[in-house]
Amino acid sequence: METILYYFTGTGNSLAAAKEIAAALGDCDIVPIASLMDTPGDVVPAAERVGIVCPVYFAGLPAMVATFAERLDLTGAKYVFSVVTFGGSGDAPALRQLHAILTTKSGRGLDAGFGVKMPGNYVLMYEPPTGTKREKMLADAKGAFVRITDTIRKGGRQDLPSSFILQALHSLMYPRFIAGVHDKDRNFSVTDACTSCGTCAAVCPAGNIELIDKRPVWKHRCELCCACIHLCPVQAIQAGRGTAKRQRYRNPDTSIADLKNQRERKA
Ligand SMILES: Cc1cc2nc3c(=O)[nH]c(=O)nc-3n(C[C@H](O)[C@H](O)[C@H](O)COP(=O)(O)O)c2cc1C
């Protein structure tokens, strides 16, 4: 295997990115980070080229990705890159956070880091973009994947983006996010529309949902990826009052089946 791509996703943007890049590179294994969370010890990639693809959360990395990066032994890697998907801003501090963790662990960080704007999915705060706005974002992202793959294929170096303001935002918001993220599901609830189909449990990358008496119960290991809210086929999952009136989102290049069972299998 020439390349391994590790990914984390809630609603499919980062998986779609990983799939596009993998298809263009060829000879590439796509591995869900969630599937490695219960394995013991360090993760040593069996490939010389290693990529990490994930969303930006609060101008930083999802908690699970940060934990994974701390276990990733890159001493044998020849080329390391990351692609972070984000809805508005925050790619610079997220990539720099990843670079710092990898450097501490393996004495080498990212050779290249890329941010790709995609539809924002933080439905607790806002409605994901719809219609032509969403279509344009996705089309622009596809163009970005082509350029990114071109750089990766050539082993090109890409300086990490930097932003003083976003870095300050990261320092302000991210520690609070990390401190409380696993408990954020205390705000989640299910309505009588629930059909007990189990999709919420199957798509949760944290294995945080169990069906008890045919209803989802959240176990406070939440990553706040919002997959359960977005992917429920009958929109029965809410988080506070705001989510009831907002549309849901799934990246159109990924299916629910693609997003299920990330903890158990490869993509
Ligand atoms: C908890 C949470 C926090 C987020 N924070 C940010 C952020 O700080 N900046 C940003 O641009 N997008 C933010 N987003 C949007 C996601 O980064 C974006 O929609 C991403 O592409 C989702 O990827 P996925 O579909 O692979 O889960 C956030 C989304 C969630 C769920």
Image: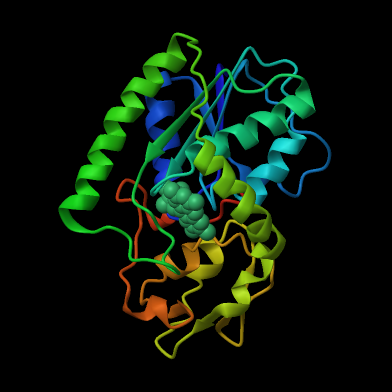
Displayed quadrant of residue 138 = top left
Figure check: 12 above or below 29: below
Determine whether, in the image, residue 118 is placed left or right of residue 46: left
Figure check: 5 above or below 181: above
User: Residue sitting at 33 percent across and 66 percent down?
Assistant: 127
* Res 259 visible: no
Name, please, the residue furthest toward the top: 154
On the image, the x and y values in percent for residue 180 come to 68, 65
Name, please, the residue furthest toward the right: 41
User: Residue sitting at 60 percent across and 22 percent down?
Assistant: 110
The count of marks equals 0
On the image, the x and y values in percent for residue 75 come to 75, 18
On the image, the x and y values in percent for residue 207 come to 64, 62
Which of the image's four quarters has the N terminus? Answer: top right
* Res 19 visible: yes
Viewer-side residue, 256 vs 110: 110
On the image, the x and y values in percent for residue 12 come to 42, 49
Determine whether, in the image, residue 46 is placed left or right of residue 229: right
User: Residue sitting at 55 percent across and 49 percent down?
Assistant: 169
Viewer-side residue, 94 vs 77: 94
Name, please, the residue furthest toward the bottom: 192
User: Residue sitting at 44 percent across and 8 percent down?
Assistant: 154
Displayed quadrant of residue 173 = bottom right
Colouring chosen for the image of the structure: rainbow
